[in-house]
Amino acid sequence: QSFFKPIQGASPQSPTSQITKITVVGVGNVGMAIAQTILTQGIADEIALVDVNVDKLRGEMLDLQHAAAFLPRTKISASIDYSNTTGSDLVIVTAGARQITGESRLNLLQRNLALFSKVIPPLAAKSPDTIFLIVSNPVDVLTYVAWKLSGFPSNRVMGSGTNLDSSRFRFLIADHLDLNAQDVQAYIVGEHGDSSVALWSSISVGGVPILSFLERQQIAYEKQTLEKIHKKVVESAYEVISLKGYTSWAIGYSVASLARTILRDQRSIHPVSVLAKGFHGIDGGEPFLSLPAQLGRNGVLGVTNVNLTEEEATQLRVSARTILEVQAQLGI
Ligand code: 6V0
């Protein structure tokens, strides 16, 4: 029995509606920040949460559901069973093992590889047409792992990569010049983390290329300032983790912006981790690392043909080699 009575002459059939469904795997600090940003921005009709911690999973689901009166209508479900993720348009993976004191990065990676071996195949089977967006660290290598384990075409597997690093970069430049960060165009590419590469030549404010402007003004010392800003970007995550224990809000907004671009086919450009083979002289393997990519409903639509200086291209290839060395030790 329905709450509403149909109006006179109405057809009993409703047109099949197109539901947008996002799965978020891992309801830790990062997964929940992503889920709540997606909710407040009304990006999905349905969010399916997955975790191995049953109580935490149900608690987080209920807590979000209780905000329904203040949010765009979104169905929120949670289950440890992957059947609940069936038919997802986008699967965001934030599940990750935490580094144990004294544990090497490689050991942590081996544990996350084991975790991904359990998580990725059932997700891919339940949503064979989905797009994977990997967030768990080390994000570039784990995006490669997800690509291998899913058997998906490369355009449907990407990592959040340096989208966050670039946002931090834009914030710090805007803060330094007293501007709005949304008016600052600037890209950090390569590995998400220590060997990331700042594309100086790409920095512009309101259409004015910053470096050539500064060079005309002979403010050479500003270049040093920009280099300091890049160093600060690399240190940002460590700083936030040492102060509050984890990072969450910025990665939440960063990933939600990627979700919106993909699902609403916005075709905007984001630096994300993609299969970088063949770009800027990167060869000798299949590394995933961040390049400015155009994103839309079909995932990665292409990579911007950005002009790198010789120094930037060399740094990018070093970044690629670092990632390839790690990938080679995985044995997949
Ligand atoms: P967290 O708070 O420990 O949450 C991890 C969650 O994963 C927990 O709720 C676990 O129960 C869950 N989990 C573990 N195993 C499984 C499994 N097999 N299936 C489903 N869920 C599982 O970590 P936090 O949320 O802080 O971070 C998550 C990951 O994101 C880590 O790998 C971080 O390093 C990474 N980040 C990546 C960033 C990026 O820019 N790419 C930024 C921030 C964090």
Image (cartoon, rainbow, N blue to C red):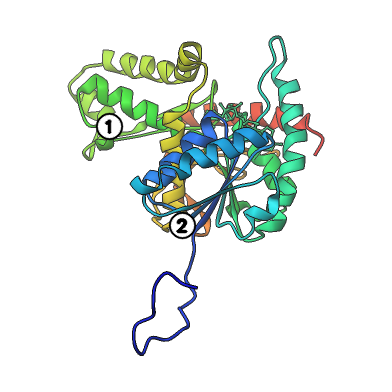
Residue 57 quadrant:
top right
Front residue of this view, candidates 215 and 291: 291
What residue would you read off at disc 2? 45
Front residue of this view, candidates 142 and 62: 62
Q: Residue furthest right?
A: 331
Which mark identifies residue 32? none
Q: Is mark 1 within 8 Å of ligand 1?
A: no
Q: Is mark 2 on a helix, strand or loop?
A: loop
The amino acid on which the numbered mark 2 sits, given as a three-letter code, is: Asp
Q: Where is residue 58 in the image (x, y as percent from the top left)?
A: 59, 39
Residue drawn where x is 68% and y is 10% of the image: 101
Front residue of this view, candidates 215 and 195: 195
Tag 2 and tag 1, C-beta contact below 8 Å: no
The mark lying in front, picked from 2 and 1, is: 2
- Where is the C terminus found, in terms of image quarters? top right
Q: Is residue 86 above or below residue 256?
A: below
Mark-to-mark CA distance, 2 and 1? 30 Å
Q: Is residue 173 left or right of residue 148?
A: left
Q: Position of residue 182 (x, y in %)?
A: 27, 37
Of callouts 2 and 1, the N-terminal one: 2
Front residue of this view, candidates 74 and 191: 74
What residue would you read off at disc 1? 181
Residue 11 quadrant:
bottom left
The amino acid on which the numbered mark 1 sits, given as a three-letter code, is: Ala
